[in-house]
Each structure stands twice: as structure tokens, then as C-alpha cells.
Amino acid sequence: MKKTDINQYQHFLKVVDCQQACPAHTPVPEYIRLIHAKRYDDAYMINWESNVFPGILGRVCDRPCEPACRRGRVEEEPVAICRLKRVTADYKGDIRDRLPKAPFKSNGKKIALIGAGPASLTVARDLAPLGYQITLFERDIKGGGMMRSQIPAFRLPQSVLDEEVDYILQMGVKAEFGTAISSLQKLVNSDFDAIFVGTGAPKGRAIDIEGYQQANAHVAIGIDWLSSVSFGHLDSAPKRVVVLGGGNTAMDCCRTAKRLGADDVKVVVRSTFDAMKASPWEKQDAKAEGIDIICDHTPNRFVIEDGRFTGVEFNQVESVYDKSGKRVLRNTGETLFCPCDFVLVAIGQDTSFPWIERDIGIEFNEWQQPVLNKKSLQSTVAKVFFGGDAAFGPENIITAVAHGHKAAISIDLFCQGKDPSIRPDTDFNLISQKMGVHEWSYTNIIDHDLRHPVPHIDWQKASEELATEVELGFDEKLAFEESERCLNCDVHTIFTEATCIECSACEDICPTDCINFIANISDDITPPEQLLKGKLRVEKMHEQQDYMISDVLKTGNIMVKDEDMCLHCGLCAERCPTGAWDMQKLVIDNIDATIK
């Protein structure tokens, strides 16, 4: 069989499931080890290098890392990666002396950023230290984009947002707040060498059903309403509120409405509870605050009686899935009337570019999204790049950050006269963790330990105070205990064929039976998953993870280790009498370049 190529970082990064799943490839196990050692400043800076907003994302990230966490294969719940990220922000000291400091030596190039959301701010953070003159245009009066306008203060305190946005603005960025761009053509014709569009998906979807025109004064788009609350234009809500939609915006709307005085708040969604798009923890928090979530109902009409709006009528539906797995809603014939005074519509968002002239060379697809080179995020006008929700539609903050890193590399290459789609290479290193014959520089004991819940304030109090943060976060003791649940997946088992005597001691001691010595198979073309079917002690659980396959050993056998099953406990290396196994930590030098 073909030996696994371990001269590239891709094999090792893929094994670190949490880091691979993070769009910005944050080195999760490394910062968790630093939390365990109470080195909070160092842990914060590792986060800041990759995800840019540790304090923000430690509270509101969509957490793609957690479903990938290997601890979820040992217990039901993964490591609380997101909330440990918050720990780095909560317990750090003053780290400003560790940030890049303006003024930077100018390289003579000028960059315009449109929108002050996470994507644009990441571009600014990456390019300012390289000497680019950055001008940021934002229609609102403060930076942060949707992080400020759409996420309520009870989830993300303004002080945390201001701090991490200011870290970037204080790097010599010229911020033009309260300035909406009305013509991209003017910017293209100006002296900017490149332009980045990070305006998000600012257009909330409306709902056009019977009675809408008469009920219009009692209906608002969810994201616009949240923005009005965030900027202080609204400070109360009617007593009876119905929220349409099942995503995180709907959860923010219903919880905000209750804090502004509504005492009867219902969320009505057409899907089942489990199929709702909102994050599980957001649904749980809404229910804990007494929000009534009504599933399997779709709005039919706004009810007007004697010229007065009285509520919304819904049709009950059931979800039916066809052979391809596509969901179809079937009307059951039953209806539901929800009396209310006000309706918030949170059924989705779209990009919107009325300020981009359609005759300047930028191509748009059928959904009115820009046509982009996916490797570089460059548009069909060479100097214009897009990122975040503005690029491909609504995603999340961490994806916007990843886009910002990618676009910054592209803009830098473009301004140097190079092809932005030819990405820079990535340097990596593997560092042995051996401290003695049976000792490692990391904790490798695998215990069964359940996830520690994050403390909250009293739910009744929470639902009454708009700006009081609901989650208290981990204290240092809980952070230490939760950090011990990490399996250190970035510390890899490295095998040296020349030293192996094929004694099978590693096979015997492996707690998951992931190490196998088998006869070589003379086939370098067929995928290993097919060749190894039925030949290993334990069948692969997840097809997307690789095997580590050795070169042919002296006996003609090969060593096959299932990277999917390995717990990185180091017992194979401790047991090996010849040191053929070692535990080595992956270190990627330029993490941004791994974002493909």
C-alpha cells in the first residue's frame, strides 16, 4: 500500500478535528493547554492571531469546532471549546503591548474597506502592519457590523465588543463612521489600490401573506428591529409579540422583546424543534426564559377584524422527506390563531448591493450575489474583493473572519502584481513532547469526565434586564477542570519504521485498538478505505478521517493506524521498547495560509 505522506501539514491538521473544523483554523488544543496552565495572556494571543475576536467569539460563535471534538466520542458532550475561549478574554491582563503598534512603515498602497463588520476588521488587522493605508467606511456610527447591530447586549456586552474592535481601529485605521457608500464606481475610479466589500447580508426577508398591507404598522423585520434596539432607538415592546422564524435571529428577537416589556412572547416556526436552524443552546436559553416555541406551523394570514390587526393565523404542517432527503411541508388542514400586537419577521437575510452599479464590470449570479474566484475572493473587477456574508450569503462570524484572512492575502498579492489565486505555502513543524522515558510535556491521562455547564444568572432576572449578560462564564476552577477534558489532538503519534522491531507491544496496549500490523497489500491505487475493509481490529467510524500507513517493514508487514480512533494518549510511545513511537506537537507557523 502507498505510504501516508506526512511531509505536508494537511494530514496532521485534519487529525486535529476541532482546528480543522474551525473556518479560521484556531489552534484549539494549544490554547486550552495554556488555560490549564493559567497562561491566559498567551492563550488569548493565540486566539487573536487566528480568530481575531476571542472575547466576542467566546460568547457568540456558532461553534463548528465542538461537533468535531473527539471528546464527543468518549462522552456525549464535547469539550466546551467556545466557552474556554471566553476564559482567555475574561482572565487576560493588559495585552496591548503585545499587539502590532501603529504607525507602520508605509508601502504606498491604499485600501478601502466597505463595512466595519468582522470580515473588514480582519482585513484591516492583517494588512495594516504590512504598511497599507486603510480607510474604513461604515454607515453606522460605531464599528462591529452585525456583531453590534444584531446581537443583543445580554449575549454580547458592548464593552467586550468595543474593546476588540478598538484593538484594530487603533492600528492606524482611518475610520469613516456614519458614511454610507452610494457608488462603488466612485471608489473604483479613486486612488485606492484595492477595495474590500464586507457589508454583510443586511436585507431581512419580508413576508407577503394575506393582510400584510393592513397589518404593516404592526410588523417589523427582525434584524432591523434588533438594530434599532442596539442603537437606542427603541426601548419598549408591545405586550403580545409573535416571532416568525427558527434561527438565531428569531431567538434574539424573542428574548429581546421579553426584556423590553412583552409578557406574552411566542416563536412560531414551520419546522420541528430539532430541525430549527437556531443553535441548540440558543433554543434552550429561550425556553428557560419562558418563551413559547410553537413548531410545525406556517403563517397563513394576518388577521384584521373591523379594520384592526388582531393576530396571525397559521396552518399546521408536517415535515415529509423525499428520497433525496429534501423536506416538504404537508398541510394537515388544522389552523392556529395567535392573538398579538406585534410581529417580528426573522425568516432569513439576503445580500443587498443597490450602491454597486451594474455596468462597471462586476458580474452577479442569479441570487444577485457577486461572482467570485473562491480561492481569492476576487470579483470580476480585479481590484474589488468580497468577504463575509457579502460574498456568498449569510454564514457566521468565524466564517467572516476566515474570509478576511483569505482576502487580506489576496489583496497583498494583488498589490504586489501577483496572481491572488496562487496561495502562499504553509510552514509547519512537529516538536517532540518527550520529557523522559515515560513522561510528556502535556497531560495525557484519559478520564471519563462530563462537560461542565456554564453558570447563568437567575433566568427570571435575565429576562428582565436588557444589558445584563446572561452567562457568567467559567471561573478559574471550572475552566481548569473543563480544560482537562481536552484530548490534545494536536499531539500526534509519529512512527519510525527503521526503529520498529514489530513486537506488537503498541497493538496490545492501545485502548482503542487503532494500531494494526498487517501484511502489505500490493495496490497503490485503490483507496485505503476499500483495501483495509475487514482487515483491521476495529472498523473506521468516520470515513472522512485518514489512516496513517507506514512503509513496508522488515517482515513485509505494514503498520496501519486509524487516525479516527486514536485518543493521543501516548501509551503506544510509552510502551515501545525501541522508541519507534513518539508524541509530537503540530505547530503551524503561518496559520492564515492554511485557509483555502
Image (cartoon, helix red, strand yellow):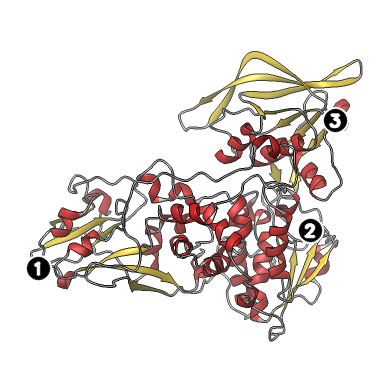
- Choose between 113 and 29: the one closer to the eye: 29
- Report which residue position mark 2 lands on: 356
- Residues at discs 1 and 2 in contact (Cβ within 8 Å): no
For this orientation, the residue located farthest to the front is: 477
Going from N to C along the chain, the mark reached first, 2 or 3, is: 3
Residue linked to disc 1: 554
Residue position marked by numbered label 3 in the rendering = 218
Q: Residue at coordinates 19% horizontally, 49% vertically from top-left?
A: 536
Q: CA distance from mark 1 to mark 3?
A: 79 Å
For the residue carrying disc 2, how many other residues have a C-alpha within 10 Å: few (<14), some (14-19), or many (20+)?
A: some
Q: Residues within 10 Å of mark 3 (few under 14, many from 20)?
A: some
Q: Is residue 450 left or right of residue 121?
A: left
Q: Residue furthest bottom?
A: 105
442 or 578, which lies in front? 442
Q: Earlier in the sequence, mark 1 or mark 3?
A: 3
Vertical comparison of 248 with 594: above or below = above
